[in-house]
Image (spheres, rainbow, N blue to C red):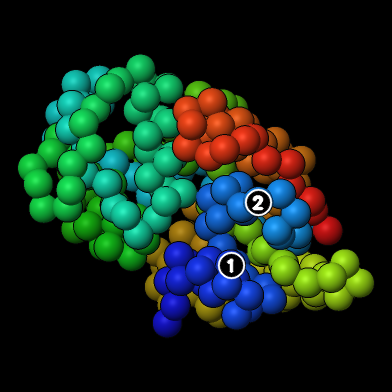
């Protein structure tokens, strides 16, 4: 199964016309590369649970951080949270090196957190919300088609979202999965989510992580 970063690469190479990609893919792309399906995405309005920094010292004392290169979105969010929100200047180390904190995402993050509930975690969506008052958007549906083709595709994606939301109890196999897909994740892409995307892009541009603050086109 393709990872989100693989999907982004395939879409960037025009091997795909449509893809669910990390938000960094559309924020860092040249202007006009993608159209974004309105009303549908993957984000979190509070605790996302599966994207966090596991830390062994108090957050304000973090000096070294091991990042997960598999997700640039989570990496850049972690850097913003630590550097801009907590005013820290940590050193980022390679995988396998000792560190005060480690970025974990996805299934490994969920599995570790469930196995070690007593340990300390900085949930990155929670931190973003606390400092900005906004939800965080991790992924969007990006479209690389002419406008006349892109419009019905965006409509179909929103229709698929409705079917998926109505089927969450069927899709989820365990009580935790039900809680995760209903409470930790949000699938909307409305005014608040768009505001959050804009703010995230502006912060990245200010830090020099992307060339310019992007203006996305929503369909």
Task: Name the quadrant of the C terminus.
Answer: bottom right
Real-space Cα distance between discs 1 and 2?
A: 11 Å
**In the rendered image, which quarter is residue 182 located in?**
bottom right
Image position of 64 (left or right of 204): left
Counting labels gives: 2
**Label 1 secondary element:** helix
Query: Is any atom of residue 162 visible in this view?
Result: no
**Up-down relation of residue 149 to residue 98 (above or below):** below
**Up-down relation of residue 79 to residue 94 (above or below):** above
Q: Position of residue 212 (x, y in %)?
A: 62, 35
Image position of 207 (left or right of 26): left
Task: Name the quadrant of the N terminus.
Answer: bottom left
What residue appears at the point 30 percent right and 20 percent down from the top-left corner?
88
Q: Position of residue 39 (x, y in %)?
A: 76, 56
Crowd class of label 1 (few under 14; some 14 to 19; many from 20; radius 10 Å): some
Image position of 5 (left or right of 166): left
Image position of 178 (left or right of 158): left
- Which one is nearer the viewer's eye here, 163 or 97? 97
Tell me, for residue 12, which label it has, or none: 1
**Up-down relation of residue 160 to residue 181 (above or below):** below
Crowd class of label 2 (few under 14; some 14 to 19; many from 20; radius 10 Å): few
Query: Is any atom of residue 21 visible in this view?
Result: yes
**Up-down relation of residue 60 to residue 55 (above or below):** above
Q: Can you name the residue that lies furthest to the left here?
A: 98
**In the rendered image, which quarter is residue 34 located in?**
bottom right
Q: Can you name the residue that lies furthest to the right here?
A: 148
Tell me, for residue 30, which label it has, or none: 2
Q: Could you tell which of marks 1 and 2 lies nearer the N-terminus?
A: 1
What residue appears at the point 71 percent right and 49 percent down from the top-left corner?
31
Q: Position of residue 176 (x, y in %)?
A: 40, 64
**Label 2 secondary element:** loop
């Amino acid at each position: 199964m393709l990872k989100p970063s693989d999907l982004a690469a395939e879409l960037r190479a025009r091997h795909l016309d449509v893809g669910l990609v990390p938000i960094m893919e559309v924020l860092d792309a040249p202007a006009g590369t993608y159209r974004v399906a309105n009303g549908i995405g993957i984000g979190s309005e509070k605790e996302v649970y599966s994207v966090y920094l596991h830390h062994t010292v108090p957050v304000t004392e973090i000096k070294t951080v091991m990042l997960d290169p598999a997700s640039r979105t989570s990496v850049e969010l972690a850097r913003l949270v630590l550097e801009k929100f907590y005013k820290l200047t940590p050193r980022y180390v390679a995988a396998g090196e000792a560190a005060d904190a480690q970025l974990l995402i996805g299934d490994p993050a969920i599995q570790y957190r469930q196995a070690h509930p007593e340990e300390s975690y900085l949930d990155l969506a929670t931190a973003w919300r606390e400092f900005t008052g906004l939800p965080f958007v991790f992924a969007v549906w990006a479209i690389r088609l002419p406008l006349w083709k892109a419009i019905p595709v965006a409509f179909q994606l929103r229709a698929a979202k409705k079917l998926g939301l109505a089927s969450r109890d069927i899709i989820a196999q365990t009580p935790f999965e039900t809680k995760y897909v209903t409470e930790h994740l949000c699938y909307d892409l409305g005014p608040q989510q768009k505001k959050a995307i804009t703010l995230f892009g502006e912060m990245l541009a200010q830090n020099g992580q992307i060339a310019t603050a992007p203006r996305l086109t929503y369909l």
